[in-house]
Amino acid sequence: MQKIITLLFGIVLFSTGCKSEKKEKEELTIETKKQEISTFDLGKSVFNGKGKCYTCHKTDKKSIGPSIQEIIKVYKEQNGDIIAFLKQNAEPIVDPETYAVMKTNFAIIKTFTPEELEAVKIYMMDVSKGKTQ
Ligand code: HEC
């Protein structure tokens, strides 16, 4: 009887021990993943990926929308807040006449996390200064 109890106790200890070890490993991979991608890279992937911003905003040439450089220049000059604009809390200051075209993107932009919004802003600022990667 004593032996069986010790055995059962051992199995319980063993299985819970395994579980917590697994959890620790999972947490570790999440942390390393977070560190692997920089704010610039996150911004880049949102800008060129799910945000599709790149289809209308090139780095230094006007296309459907103003260039990234033009946007950053105006925002610096006028002390604008890009994140407030992207959250629809601020009026357009770069080219209000074509704002209707930009407005079609707010449905996608609404799905961005605060981290992604910040990353897009950093990405645009870095790109306007000539950073490419
Ligand atoms: C379908 C084309 C199109 C796409 C896609 C697009 N934009 Fe725009 N964007 C425009 C146009 C046109 C303007 C100029 C009108 C204006 O100033 O609001 C503009 C203006 C802006 C401005 C300046 C706003 C201001 O103050 O005038 C910012 C910032 C901006 N876009 C960011 C983004 C980001 C970030 C994305 C991706 C999530 C994006 N845009 C995707 C067309 C687009």
Image (tube, rainbow, N blue to C red):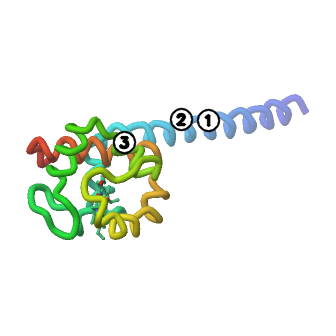
- Say which residue label 3 marks: 118
| Label drawn at residue 24 | 2
Hey, what amino acid is under mark 3?
Answer: Glu
* Coordinates of residue 93 in the picture (x, y in percent): 29, 50
User: In the picture shown, does residue 71 fall above or below 96?
Assistant: above
Return the disc, 3 or 2, that comes first in the chain's sequence: 2
The residue closer to the viewer here, 28 or 52, is 52
Q: Quadrant of residue 96?
A: bottom left
Q: Quadrant of residue 73?
A: top left
Helix, strand or loop status at disc 3? helix
How far is disc 1 from disc 3 in space, using C-alphas? 35 Å
Mark 1 or mark 3, which is nearer to you? 3
Residue depth check, mark 3 versus mark 2: number of the one nearer the observer = 3
The N terminus: image quadrant: top right
The residue indicated by pointer 1 is 20
The image quadrant that residue 21 belongs to is top right
Estimate the x, y position of residue 110 in percent, counting from the top left: 48, 57
Decide if ligand 1 comes within 8 Å of the CB at mark 2: no
